[in-house]
Image: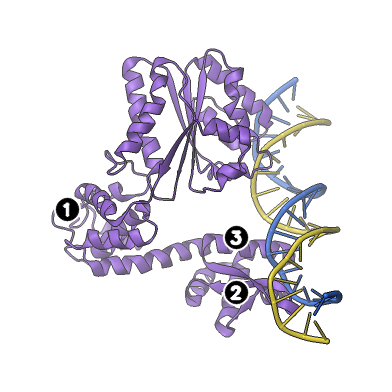
Chain colours: A purple, B blue, C yellow
Amino acid sequence: MSAQNLFSSVGQNRIFRNRSVLVSDFIPLSLPHRESEIRRLAQILSPSLEGTRPNNAFMYGLTGTGKTAVVRYVSNQLSKEALSRGAAVGLVYVNARKDDTSYRVLAQVGKQLNLHLPFTGLSVAEVYSRVTAHVEKLSCTVIISIDEIDSLVREPNGNLLYKLTRMNSDLSKSRVSLIGITNDSKVLDALDPRVRSSLGEEELIFGPYDAEQLRDILHARSSDAFQDNALGADVIPYVAALAAKDHGDARKAVDLLRKAGEVAERLGSERVRTEHVQQALSEIEVDTALEVVTKLPLHSKIILACIADLYVKKQTVITGDVFALYLHTCKRMGLEVLTSRRVSEIINELDMVGVISTRILNRGRFGRTKRIALNVDPEHVRAAISKDDILKTT
DNA sequence: CTTCCACAGGAACCAGCGGACC
DNA sequence: GGTCCGCTGGTTCCTGTGGAAG
């Protein structure tokens, strides 16, 4: 995004009325096609207004199906209602991908209840007891929503969830309820059976949106987001159809619509058209890839550069070749090298962020390895990497 | 049918940092 | 000031494995 794009159009915007409606963490005033889930969750949580403990709940659904939005929406409403009734309800929302250790989750819970905790230095047990004591002192009902809870089950110190479900036995004046949110159906199986049954007191399942529902969602948002008549009539159906093919992810649909608006704006167009959507689609891919690549640590960049190098020359790129070239490159640059174990891990990380994709390949006599394919234009990789001073000479 | 390759990926551990507590 | 802690970003050592070659 250029500086021109950032400032030149401020105050004289022909496309957007309020762009922020289309950023992903915006909580809309209404959530079309999630009314029944909202009612259900509200019903589950309503005992908190009368000082009794709501059942724990577990919410499952693919990304962009509105789980997080529903939780935040209901939480907002509940906290307003609690305020007006004078009910003591504490609402906590934690994203376990961001705060991905027991310590950090607990610290986050404490922080949102106005308990200051240092980010390190204490033992997990100490943080747990401080949080518990604090909750007890508040004498209220605390509802803790843990989003992307799957990040927590694999944690070595992984009995946090068990401890949280049992926290009530350490409390007398206060109560704690948990809402677990995930998009990974396998989590349930991996969970400690005691946690599973406790969390599964209530279950909400979020199905993917179909194209028609996505259209409604986009319509609802766009009337606030765009100027009148700034949106071509076929744009929303087009975006909705694209997103519906892609697992009905509403977040992606909204992102795409915003990006299309930005493209139209940048091109000086008076209204958004489907061509802008197409361009937005390819820009989103390039943008995210580029952004990811520039932020990569040095050795990850080198490895990615090696992969890109090999990829343009060969049809199949393989871990061993990458490692060999990596060793050579490091030696040439006078850098110390990482082990093959670590390099293998970095390749997995690159796969995870999406710039490459890998598949395990069994070549019989010639061993088992990984075939690596580059997901982005090698030139883009080169461009992004060459911004790094150390790598400039290569 | 057996062998054996070229790694994948799990487990345990470690150094070094920023920090709390007494 | 010494002892504890969590976390990152590694290392070392290890066991596991699908299927072409022999």
Q: Which picture quadrant has residue A359?
A: bottom right
Q: Amino acid at mark 1?
A: Gln
Q: Position of residue A246 (x, y in %)?
A: 38, 61
Label 3: which residue?
Answer: A349
Q: Earlier in the sequence, mark 3 or mark 1?
A: 1
Label 1: which residue?
Answer: A227
Q: Which class describes the residues within 10 Å of circle 3: few (<14), some (14-19), or many (20+)?
A: some
Q: Which mark is residue A307?
A: 2
Q: Which picture quadrant has residue A32?
A: top left
Q: Which mark is residue A190?
A: none
User: Relative to A359, is B14 above or below?
Assistant: above
Q: Amino acid at mark 2?
A: Ile
Q: Which quadrant does the C terminus of chain A fall into?
A: bottom right
Circle 3 chain: A
Q: Position of residue A138 (x, y in %)?
A: 50, 16
Q: Amino acid at mark 3?
A: Glu
Give the number of callouts. Answer: 3
Judge left or right: residue A293 versus residue A363. left
Circle 2 chain: A
